[in-house]
Image: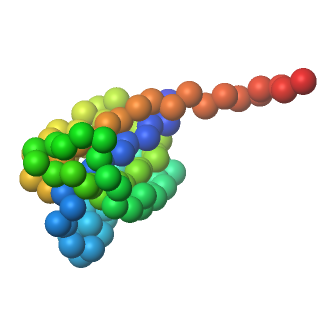
Amino acid sequence: MFLNSYETIYILKPDVTDEINLSLVNYYKTIIKQNGGQNIFVQHRGRRHLSYNITHYYDGIYVQVNYRGSGELVKLLEKSMRLNENIIRYLTVKQDILQNVHIY
């Protein structure tokens, strides 16, 4: 089965504690692993000011997750994020992996 590379970034409410943040990261890592995802890499991007307010929040905590998986996995992950009250925005993009690229 061919797995695509994806990058998901989600923004947490600024009042979320570190414990909740870590539990969400572990929860999403578990979902990815249980549904056939591989090469999971999580980066905490920290608190940043938003360009515009989202549901009355001006700051957010950014978390980036890179992984390999199927389109069904992305649907499941995004549905879970949509229903989570601590997440104010999320975005998943498919990454193109360039293989055998020669730069001259």
Query: Exactly how many numbered labels are in the figure?
Result: 0
> At x 36% / y 45%, what residue is drawn?
9
Relative placement, left or right, of 70 versus 31 is right
As displayed, is residue 32 above or below residue 91?
A: below
> At x 45% / y 30%, what residue is drawn?
94
Closer-to-camera residue (10/97): 10
Relative placement, left or right, of 75 versus 8 is left
Quadrant into which the C terminus falls: top right
Image coordinates of residue 51 in percent, x first then y, are 30, 41
| Whether residue 8 can be seen here | yes
Q: Check the image and name the residue furthest to the bottom.
A: 19
| Whether residue 35 can be seen here | no
Image coordinates of residue 61 in percent, x first then y, are 30, 58
Image coordinates of residue 95 in percent, x first then y, are 51, 31
> At x 25% / y 55%, what residue is drawn?
59
In the rendered image, which quarter is residue 101 located in? Answer: top right
> At x 29% / y 47%, what residue is drawn?
50
As displayed, is residue 19 above or below residue 34?
A: below
Relative placement, left or right, of 3 versus 73 is right
As displayed, is residue 10 above or below residue 23?
A: above
Closer-to-camera residue (78/32): 78
Image coordinates of residue 89 in percent, x first then y, are 23, 42
Q: Check the image and name the residue furthest to the right.
A: 104
Report the colour scheme: rainbow
In the rendered image, which quarter is residue 72 located in? Answer: top left
